[in-house]
Image: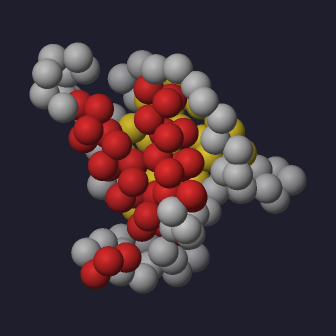
Amino acid sequence: MVSAEEQLAADGSAIVEAFAADLQETDRFPLRDPSPAPGWRAYVRGAVAELGASGMPLVGSRLEISGDLPRGAGLSSSAALSVALCLALAQLGSQGAQAGGELPWNGSTSRRSARV
C-alpha cells in the first residue's frame, strides 16, 4: 500500500519524501531531480522520473509505503510497488481529476491525499 499527501519543503520547493515502513527508512529528493538510487529508493525515483518524462503533472509528495507481500519471493512485489507508486503520484498530480477515468479522488479540498 502507498499512502500519499502533497508536501513542499520549508523553502516552498517541491520535494518527494518516501518512507518505507517495513524497513524504517526514508528517502528525500527534489521532485525535478529524481537522480538514481539503490534498492527500494530506485522504484520511487524511477516512478517520479518516468511519470514526469511522460508529461504527467506531479506535485511534491510525502509517500508512505507498506505491505505484506514478501520481497524477492517471486510474487511480483516490485511490480506491485511500481503500480501503487504510479497510481498514488498520478492521483495527487491530477488535483482530483480522474486521470484516465479510473482514479477516484480520496482527498479533501484543503489537503490533497491518496491511498492506493
Q: Residue at x 54, y 39 (%)?
A: 45
Decide if residue 32 is on the left or right side of residue 42. Answer: right
Q: Residue at x 35, y 58 (%)?
A: 87
Q: Give how far across and how far down residue 1 sits, in percent.
A: 29, 44
Decide if residue 13 is on the left or right side of residue 105. Answer: right
For residue 77, say whether it is visible. yes
Decide if residue 28 is on the left or right side of residue 74. Answer: right
Q: Residue at x 31, y 39 (%)?
A: 81
The quadrant of the picture occupied by the C terminus is bottom left
Q: Give how far across and how far down residue 63 sits, in percent.
A: 49, 45
Q: How many marks?
A: 0
Compared with residue 86, is residue 59 higher up or lower down, i.e. above or below? below
Residue found at the very far right of the displayed protein? 11
For residue 104, say whether it is visible. no
Q: Give how far across and how far down residue 5 sits, in percent.
A: 52, 57
Residue 40 or 35: which is nearer the viewer? 35
Decide if residue 88 is on the left or right side of residue 16. Answer: left
Q: Residue at x 51, y 67 (%)?
A: 56
